[in-house]
Amino acid sequence: LIVCASLVDKVPNLAGLARTCEIFSARTLVMPNLLVKKQDDFKSISASANDWIDMEECKEDDLLSWLYKKRSEGYSIVGLEQTASSKCLTKMEFPEKTVLLLGKEKEGIPIEFLSAVDQCIEIPQL
């Protein structure tokens, strides 16, 4: 699993994602800027995640081409977004090679990136 957080810009959220990726053994966390790893608030929230997971940089301007490149490498692109055709996260069987695309805080995944998504999933609201 590659978690793509290129659209996430809040440092505490990126740090929490790093920690979550470590816990769930994600292969890679993609962030908009790797310099964030040096910030104190990132370090304190992410704990030791820096030491255990691969992190890659992809800025929003490069994201669409990055997604298409991953698809050409055999990855399925799954967007975490509420749409009319989204599947429930708990019912989704993820392909072995998956990129999970996360959206912007409050706004979700912009339409230009949804065009690159193979399937959308949503987290059930209880």
Image (cartoon, rainbow, N blue to C red):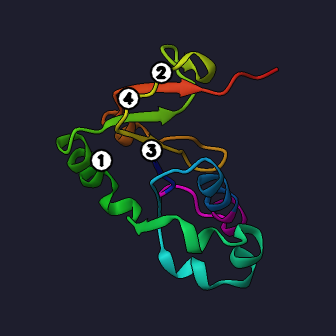
What residue is shown with label 2?
93
Instruction: Decide which of 37, 28 is in the foreground and name it.
Output: 28
Q: Nearer the viewer, mark 1 or mark 3?
A: 3
Location of residue 52 in the rendering, given as x and y in whole percent from the top left corner? 55, 67
Residue 11 within the magenta-colored segment of the rendering: yes
As measured in the structure, the alpha-carbon distance from the residue carrying label 2 to the one carrying label 4 is 7 Å
Q: Earlier in the sequence, mark 3 or mark 4?
A: 3
Instruction: Decide which of 52, 79 is in the foreground and name it.
Output: 52
Give the numbered dot on residue 95: 4
Q: Where 33 sits versus 110, above or below?
A: below
Q: Please give left or right for residue 90 compared with residue 109 in the image.
A: right
Q: Earlier in the sequence, mark 4 or mark 1?
A: 1
Q: Where 116 sits versus 45, above or below?
A: above
What residue is shown with label 3?
1
Task: Write the residue at 41% across / 67% down.
Answer: 56
Q: Earlier in the sequence, mark 1 or mark 3?
A: 3
Residue, far left: 72
Res. 28 image quadrant: bottom left
What residue is shown with label 1?
67
As measured in the structure, the alpha-carbon distance from the residue carrying label 1 to the one carrying label 3 is 14 Å
* Residue density around tag 3, few if under 14, some if 14–19, many if 20 or more, within 10 Å: some
Look at the image and give the residue range highlighted in magenta.
Answer: 6-15
Q: Please give left or right for residue 73 compared with residue 122 in the image.
A: left
Q: Earlier in the sequence, mark 2 or mark 3?
A: 3
Res. 18 image quadrant: bottom right
